[in-house]
């Protein structure tokens, strides 16, 4: 069992029982308790579990994602590197779609020198584009979600059906070889699928902590993306597993 499969199994056990003893998990998975603790800390950083006195507890509100503010302060350097690598994929004159999220948002910082039309459901994008005459911003319509700091819903999906962009950059909450890219909420998955269908080339942006995590709804398989961009902190074993299921991977 590789690291990706192990983390998926840990999360599945937590979803089934609600909590688990770290030593018992280590024994069941035939790894050290320190390895299990590191895996659980990844989930804890995502706001999915709480670790207390040698036991992990699944957040019963796990179907609701951590707030935008919380996510924005996590893995900052890695997200910046991913954002730069994503921005390098954009050509002058492109029309691009950017998904709502703290990782995808970082790429706007590296587009300043390019003439690009940016279409997004992320309202914080306004602050990154404001004052730059070379970047044209189009905000998607929909119902505002404070946790994600963006808009979602049927109106968003319907509008995206009229869009034909050059590239789309999509974030996610979890990635595994078997389940693909997943998110906790059905409305988020619906918009991500619409974003995916509205562009000629598709990119998935996900820091290394997302790999091995399975959420409620799949929105695309990893092989559906032209390129998956992550950070260089991913374990070598996980890298090789993901490479088998991706057309191209970039480790920023």
Image (cartoon, helix red, strand yellow):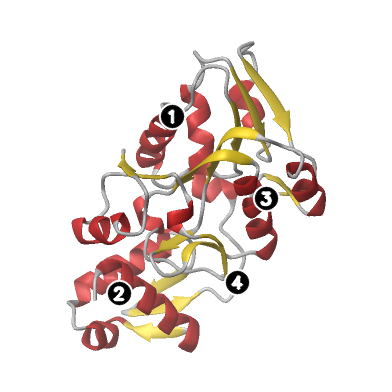
Q: CA distance from mark 4 to mark 1?
A: 36 Å
According to the picture, the residue beneath numbered tag 4 turns out to be 61
Q: CA distance from mark 3 to mark 1?
A: 21 Å
Specify which label sits upstream in the sequence, 3 or 1.
Answer: 1
Q: CA distance from mark 3 to mark 4?
A: 26 Å
**Residue 96 screen position, x and y as percent:** 59, 31
- Quadrant where the C terminus sits is top left
Specify which label sits upstream in the sequence, 3 or 2.
Answer: 2
Q: Are marks 2 and 1 in contact (CB under 8 Å)?
A: no
Name above or below for residue 98 compared with residue 47.
above
Question: Circle 2 sits in a helix, a strand or a loop, which is it?
Answer: helix
Q: On the rendered structure, is 196 left or right of 16?
A: right
**Residue shown at the point (64%, 11%) measured from the top left:** 133
Q: On the rendered structure, is 8 left or right of 60?
A: left
Q: Are marks 3 and 2 in contact (CB under 8 Å)?
A: no
The quarter holding residue 10 reads bottom left
Residue 89, numbered circle: 1
According to the picture, the residue beneath numbered tag 3 turns out to be 194
Specify which label sits upstream in the sequence, 2 or 1.
Answer: 2
């Amino acid at each position: 069992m590789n690291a990706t499969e192990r983390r998926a199994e840990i999360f599945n056990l937590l979803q089934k029982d609600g909590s688990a003893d770290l030593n018992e998990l280590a024994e069941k998975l035939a790894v050290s308790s320190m390895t299990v603790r590191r895996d659980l800390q990844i989930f804890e950083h995502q706001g999915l579990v709480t670790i207390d006195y040698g036991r992990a507890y699944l957040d019963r509100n796990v179907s609701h994602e951590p707030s935008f503010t919380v996510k924005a302060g996590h893995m900052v350097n890695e997200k910046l590197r991913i954002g730069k690598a994503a921005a390098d994929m954009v050509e002058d004159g492109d029309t691009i779609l950017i998904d709502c999220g703290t990782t995808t948002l970082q790429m706007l910082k590296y587009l300043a020198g390019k003439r690009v039309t940016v279409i997004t459901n992320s309202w914080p994008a306004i602050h990154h584009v404001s004052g730059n005459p070379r970047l044209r911003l189009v905000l998607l319509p929909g119902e505002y979600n404070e946790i994600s700091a963006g808009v979602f819903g049927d109106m968003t999906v319907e509008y995206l059906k009229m869009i034909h962009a050059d590239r789309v950059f999509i974030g996610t909450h979890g990635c595994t070889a078997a389940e693909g890219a997943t998110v906790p909420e059905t409305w988020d998955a619906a918009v991500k699928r619409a974003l995916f269908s509205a562009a000629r080339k598709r990119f998935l942006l996900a820091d290394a902590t997302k790999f091995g995590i399975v959420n409620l709804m799949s929105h695309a398989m990893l092989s559906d993306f032209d390129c998956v961009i992550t950070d260089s902190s991913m374990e070598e074993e996980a890298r090789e597993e993901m490479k088998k299921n991706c057309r191209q991977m970039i480790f920023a």
